[in-house]
Amino acid sequence: MHGYAPGTVTPTTELVLAHRHPDDKATVGDLVVQVYRQRTPVTCRHRIIDAQGKEHLVLVVGDTFCEEGGEPAGVTGFYIDITEQFNKDVQERLSEAVQTITERRAVINQSIGMLMLRYGIDADLAFKLLTRLSQESNIKLRVIAERAVADPATLGGLVDDVADRIDNLLRSVRESGY
C-alpha cells in the first residue's frame, strides 16, 4: 500500500509518518502518541501518499505491543485501503444529488415558462416572481412551481390559487416599479 515491494524496507514509525498526507499530519501524529504512550487501541481514517506519489484513503487499526517487562515495544496493526469504495460512494451520492437537482429544476423551469407565456414577461422576471411568492408565503419555490404546473383536475382550486397569487404579485410588482 505504501508502494514498496515486500522485504525492501523495514517498517518504522518514521517511515509510516513520512507517508502521511500533509493535511493529515497533526491527526496522525496525535494517533501515534495515543496508541504508543497511552497504550490505547485506535481506529482512524486518513490519507497517505505512497512511494509513487499516489494518494490513498485508508482505515487504520492499531495497538501497542509490549516487551516482556510490559514496556511498549512498538505499534502493530493494519491498513485497509478504502479509496476505491469511498470514491464510488461519493460518485453515487453526487449522481443522486445531480438527479434530484435536475428534477427539481425542471418543474421550476416549466413554471417559469408558463408565467412567461401567460404574462408576456422574460425568464428573469418570472423567476423573481416565483422567488418572491416563495418568500412571502414561506413555501419552497419547488412546491409553488409544482402547484403552478399541476393538473387542475387533480388539485381543485390550488392551480387557480397560485395563478391568482401570481396575478396579485405581478400587479404589486408593477405598481412598485420592480
Image (tube, helix red, strand yellow):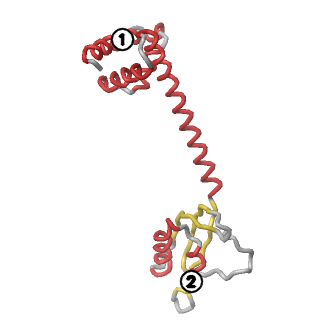
Which disc, if any, is residue 74?
2
Q: Secondary structure at mark 2?
A: strand
Q: Residue furthest bottom?
A: 69
Residue neighbourhood size for the residue with mark 2, other residues' Cα within 10 Å, grouped as few (<14), some (14–19), many (≥20): some
Q: Is residue 138 left or right of residue 16?
A: left
Q: What percent of the width, then of the height, locates residue 53? A: 64, 66
Q: Quadrant of residue 4?
A: bottom right
Q: Nearer the viewer, residue 158 or 19?
A: 19
The residue located at (59%, 63%) in the rendering is 58
Identify the amino acid type marked 1.
Asp
What residue does disc 1 label?
A: 161
Residue neighbourhood size for the residue with mark 1, other residues' Cα within 10 Å, grouped as few (<14), some (14–19), many (≥20): few
The residue located at (30%, 20%) in the rendering is 178
Q: What percent of the width, then of the height, locates residue 57? A: 59, 61
Q: Quadrant of residue 49?
A: bottom right
Q: CA distance from mark 1 to mark 2?
A: 73 Å
The residue located at (45%, 79%) in the rendering is 38
The residue located at (57%, 75%) in the rendering is 18
Q: Secondary structure at mark 1?
A: helix
